[in-house]
Amino acid sequence: MPARIATRFLTPKPTLGRFPPSVIQAWSCQQCVRWDNNRSAGGLILDNTRLYHGMSPRYGQKTGGAQEEASRVNGRKRSRKGFVLAAATGTLGGTLLFFYDDVKHAYRAAERTGRVVAALLVCINDYRVTLNKETRTEEERTTLLNACHQRCADRTLKVLEKNGSIFIKLGQHLSSLGYLLPLEWTTTFIPLQDQCPVSSFESVQEMFLRDTGHTIDEIFSSFDPMPIGAASLAQVHVAVLRETGQKVAVKVQHPTLQEWAPLDLSLTRFTFSSLKRVFPEYDLEWLAREMDFSLPQELDFQMEAENARVAREYFSKRTNAPLIIPKVIWAKKRLLVMEFISGHRPDDLEFLDSNNIDRDEVSASLAHIFNEMIFGDGAPLHCDPHGGNIAICKNNTRKRGPNFDIVLYDHGLYRTIPKEMRINYAKLWLAVINADEKEMRKYAYEVAGVTDEEFPLFASAITGRDYTVLAQNQVASSRSSEEKESITTALGDGMLQELVSLLGKVPRIMLLILKTNDLSKSSLNYLHIHVFDGTNG
């Protein structure tokens, strides 16, 4: 085959019918979006085979003789075939190696997508069949529906565990929505709180070198390969800086997150939008919107470093709370090095009691810190204050005040509440405390656009109390078993649908305030003391 003809067959043709970038990006991760670029680069490799085809061997002068001439012709053909075969084989091997990572990624992306879509379709069909079944009694209907909840929750849990990445974080968030989701769903997802992935030390080393241009050994004199803690987005290692000898905590983002986060966010949006189309009364799209907004910030550790700096500066000047925010030494987008400060979880009651740390005093300090974040003028709001992000450590040097410090970790998710909203939210709580229903309704509309019809439900949502208790000025009392049963019954009678719809309409910052309030109350509940439902103080 002449060289010019072989080159024509080996040179790639222009790609036809490409999707617009907006379409690709809506469903793909960054690696998939780069697929066309990789194919173009591969075309250059294929096109360079012309260099081989033009390099035919030179032969000596003719010596005569038909047999000898035939031999030379056959040899020339074999040589030419050999060069073409070698070029094609080498090109194919290089191209396969070039595309191997992309092919593997595409296969795994299809797997992840398939798991989500398959589970979604099966669950939707399960609910449709269950809801359309004829039942003789309401009790029978409830039993069937509860069983359906459990089946679908079990299926979803398997998908979340298998896909990992941000699906673990999604499951953790869903497990905390006891006021929105059926019990079967929230309790099934609780194990995800303790099943966070751990990235291999080899992958951490590779990412460190890629992101910093240095090996771990060049920066640290020691680096524990086993993390002391792991969460859904990152893990923390203890190390010692080579230059200063300082003991530090190194927060390392899971390397695979960068690969899968865009696709996983798209799948989350698709799931909740599909559920809304099938079951419009359960609109949970606001969860996907919040993840879309929050996750990119949580994955940027340089932004986390700035949040920590702002919080340290604010609390050092405006409050006497025994709060420690570890100082950040340096940060990259996926790496953060901070001073090492250890402590014990707030639910470690044995540690508190053995060190004579007053639980009530810890509770008051935590309440003061989070109330300052919500109501303080210009205060930064930490939006993820669960028990794993809070530690208590003994302080034996302070002469007056608490004999402990509260350490606050993980500053990736912060917001600043607009001043007008802070003031109106404070006035709303004053109205709640004073049982002034007129003022409650006024400021509920100011902070969240809540109408008079929606107000009783909103008031119960922010306080965790039955509305009749609020109207009777008993918000500071403990919840009775009758009140808890009343709330549960109301949710089962259709109020849950109304609550889901209501939360989908309130401002995003209000959702985060409610989340911070709920998580901080949970931290106080760890101490096994009475907590004033609705606020932290």
Image (tube, rainbow, N blue to C red):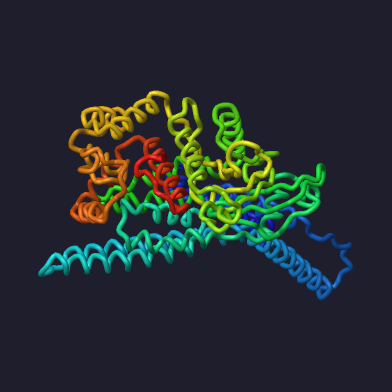
The answer to whether 79 appears left or right of 158 in the picture is right
Q: Quadrant of residue 449?
A: top left
Q: Which residue ends up furthest to the top in the rendered image?
A: 420
Classify 162 as above or below 14.
below
119, above or below 179, in the image: below
Task: Kindly tell me whether residue 13 is visible in this rendering.
Answer: no
Question: Does 328 sit left or right of 138 as displayed?
Answer: right
**Residue located 34% across and 46% down the image:** 285
The answer to whether 179 appears left or right of 250 in the picture is left
Q: Quadrant of the N terminus?
A: bottom right
Q: Position of residue 378 (x, y in %)?
A: 49, 26
- On the rendered image, what quadrant is the C terminus found in? top left
Query: Which of the two residues, 38 or 375, is positioned nearer the viewer here?
Result: 375
In the picture as drawn, the residue positioned furthest to the bottom comes out as 67
- In the rendered structure, the answer to whether residue 312 lies left or right of residue 289 reads right
Which residue is more in the foreground, 5 or 302?
302
Q: Count up the numbered dots.
A: 0
Q: Is residue 489 visible?
A: yes
- Residue 82 vertical position relative to residue 377 in the rendered view, above or below: below
Whole-percent x, y for residue 59 in the image: 85, 62
- For the point 61% across and 53% down, the residue is 355
Measuring from the top left, give residue 19's x and y in whole percent.
Answer: 45, 46
- Look at the picture and state if 102 lies above or below 434: below
Kindly identify the residue that appears in the image at 38 percent across and 37 percent down: 508
Quadrant for residue 204, please give it: bottom right
Which x, y percent locates residue 164? 50, 59
